Amino acid sequence: MSFEIEPNSALANALHPSPTGFGANPFGAAGFAHPLGGLSQSDSLGPGLGREYLMSDSGALSPVSHAHGHGSAPGKTTKVPATTPAPTMVGSASGLQFDLIWDPSVASAPTGFQTAIIGAAQQVASLYSNRMVVSVDVGYGEIGGSALGAGALGESESYGYLLSYGTVTSALHSQGYSFSASNEPTTSQFFTTSAETKALGLINPLSTSPDGFVGFTKSYPLYYGTSGTPPSNQYDLYAIAEHELTEVMGRIGMENTYQFNGKATYTPLDLFNYSQPGVLSLSPNGGYFSTDNGATNRGMYNNAAHNGGDIADWSSLVANDAFDAFTSPGVAGAMTSNDALEVAALGYKLSATA
């Protein structure tokens, strides 16, 4: 599924047409695109895992809402000019690493573009100790060779798998999480991104096969610094990159807004989205993040049904957070402790730094 962040101000509307909101499913009624068939031997799976799928953004990070796009079709070849930057490996070899694969489009990106993306990847990687590689294709003004959704500041697409409730909860239970809400969707299937499936220990964590794609706007003015506050007319690329990279890691919600193969479908993060203690939200109407059966509210989710945008992004009531559904120019987005805990709930182990 493709997920984005969007702009949130009068300036954004002046610079660009109004964002599209949640948008239509680019893959039709089924929602999944490009089934890749069986997995390679290096990606041997546990119970309940089968085909790998590519999901495209259904709520992109934009100046005020979300949109989506399509990645390159599997097997598609692209002539790569000599100026295409070489891939960049970020993070510790003993912990989480990002393999940033730069698209040819990045050759024309402004000075500072790569520095901001690398800085964001380093920040995220430093928070988790799983020994694994998240391989991400990075585009400038496009994602996977296709145009970004209208109104998107950033956008993600992820490969992933359909798993059973038991497979997901068993893997997370081994990391200390329990699931006892009154309405646990025990008979539903769950989409996990390729990167999250690595974190859960279900496929080879060191595989460098692509886990997903991210793309960043060239239509809106961006701030390429790795610290400080952006000027009043620029959006913080560093925070936008943190937003999109963590979506590839699995920070996405579905809440049965798509039914794949005719079955109700959720994501692991949906199991941490509560409407009240002991009751999961199981809807795109907002809710709150909790890791103790809803007793502690660690952040309000965006009401995607009303506002558009992504289900798993924070409500705009959470000010200046890198995981907000919408952002504004002149805002320095930041990852908070609740952000770090949210990603940890997806199977990532907090590092000493976090």
Image (cartoon, helix red, strand yellow):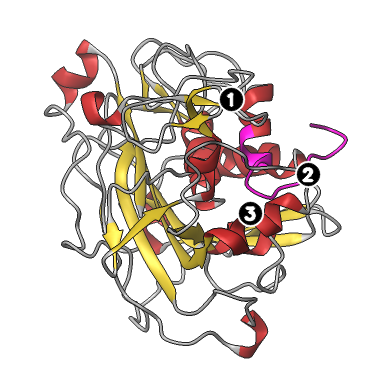
Q: CA distance from mark 2 to mark 1?
A: 16 Å
Q: Within 10 angstroms of label 2, few (less than 14), some, or many (20 or more) residues? A: few
Above or below, 307 relative to 349: above
Question: Which region shows up in magenta?
Answer: 342-354
Quarter of the picture holding the C terminus = top right
- Mark 1–mark 3 Cα distance, whole angstroms, equals 17 Å
* Residue depicted at 49% across the width and 15% down the height: 320
Task: Name the residue at 47% across, 61% down.
Answer: 212
| Marks 2 and 1 close (CB-CB < 8 Å) | no
Residue 351 lies in the magenta stretch: yes
Q: Measuring from the top left, give residue 207's x and y in whole percent.
A: 66, 74
Residue type for callout 2: Gly
Point out residue 1 in the picture as x, y percentages from the top left corner: 35, 55
Which of the two labelled residues, at mark 2 and mark 3, occupies the earlier sequence position?
3
Q: Which mark is residue 294?
A: 1
Earlier in the chain: of badge 2 and badge 1, it is 2
The majority secondary structure of the magenta stretch comes to loop
Count of numbered labels shown in the rendering = 3
The residue indicated by pointer 2 is: 176
